Amino acid sequence: MIELTQVSYGYGAGTLLNDMSLKLAPGSFHFLTGPSGAGKTTFLKLCYGELVPTQGSISIFDQDARHMNRDDVALMRRRVGVVHQDCQFLNHLSVAENIALPLTVSGRPMQDMRELNELLAWVGLTAQAEAKPPELSGGERQRAALARAVIMSPDVVLADEPTGNVDWDMSIRLLTLLIELNRLGKTVMIATHDMNLIRHAKSHVQTRVLRIAGGQLNAAGADL
């Protein structure tokens, strides 16, 4: 699905990520950890074509990321749902409208409101459907971001610190939703610094833990 081969990436004269290789197989579940500034967000951006490597190659659904044109990228993004760390919404639209926005942008307006209502119920936001984003709590915003990321029924879900600004109970709720997606066959990768979240997940789902440090990508130790 997504395969990185000897990928390096740098800003300016420096190299942030160096010689990284990884294959995200269908239905796999990965955690990506490492210290702040190590390059976790950059790594995720490489995985969904927001950035292209300075060296090496990335294949996304059998297409070379370097050679994808704008239309190729647009089609690929329908298959990759991204939960961004900053959770940006359009504040003049309702929560339901924000969640449905990827369908509108892609020219696929939802024909059956039942589908949207089911998604709102799945993330526990039925009561907030007509609210505006500024009215939501941190946990509600994260759940809305997850719903928006999966409304196109993507094959891959990439989540960048999805529990970074919420309490433990909400972290577990968000993790449970991501595990449910994985059990439906979705490939999931979560970037996080929360070791307790990773330990909790390992008791519920088969997962691979990766660590970025010093520009290198390695399997994390068993002490997690």
Image (spheres, grey):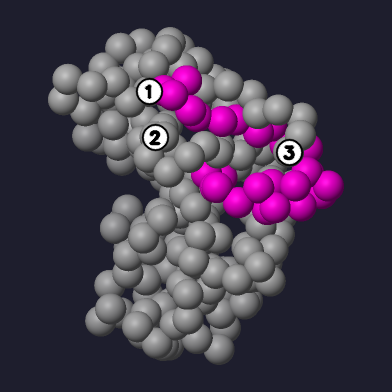
Q: Which residues are magenta?
A: 189-216
Relative placement, left or right, of 38 versus 156 is left
Residue annotated with mark 2: 39
Amino acid type shown at disc 1: Leu
Mark yes or no: residue 76 visible.
Answer: no
> Amino acid type of disc 3?
Leu
Quarter of the figure with the N terminus = top right
Q: Nearer the viewer, residue 48 or 18?
A: 18
Figure quadrant of the C terminus:
top right
Q: Is residue 192 magenta?
A: yes
Say which element carries label 3.
loop
Residue 32 among magenta residues: no
Query: How busy is the neighbourhood of tag 1: few (under 14 within 10 Å), some, or many (20 plus)?
Result: many
Q: Earlier in the sequence, mark 2 or mark 3?
A: 2
Of marks 2 and 3, the one in the foreground: 3
Report helix, strand or loop for mark 2.
loop
Q: Is residue 149 above or below residue 183?
A: below
Q: Earlier in the sequence, mark 1 or mark 2?
A: 1
Q: Position of residue 66 (x, y in %)?
A: 27, 19
Asked whether the beta carbons under mark 1 and mark 2 sit within 8 Å of each other, the answer is: yes
* Mark 2 neighbour class, 10 Å CA radius: few under 14, some 14 to 19, many 20 or more: many
Determine whether label 2 and label 3 are within 8 Å by CB: no
Is 48 or 165 nearer to us in this picture? 165
Determine whether the residue tagged by mark 1 lies in a helix, strand or loop: strand
Mark 3 surroundings within 10 Å by alpha-carbon count, few (fewer than 14), some (14 through 19), many (20 or more): few
Which residue sits furthest left? Answer: 12
Type of amino acid under label 2: Gly
* Label ID, residue 224: 3
Q: Position of residue 104 (x, y in %)?
A: 32, 63
Q: Which residue is mark 1?
A: 17
Residue nearer the viewer, 107 or 49: 49
Which of the numbered marks, if any, corresponds to residue 210? Answer: none
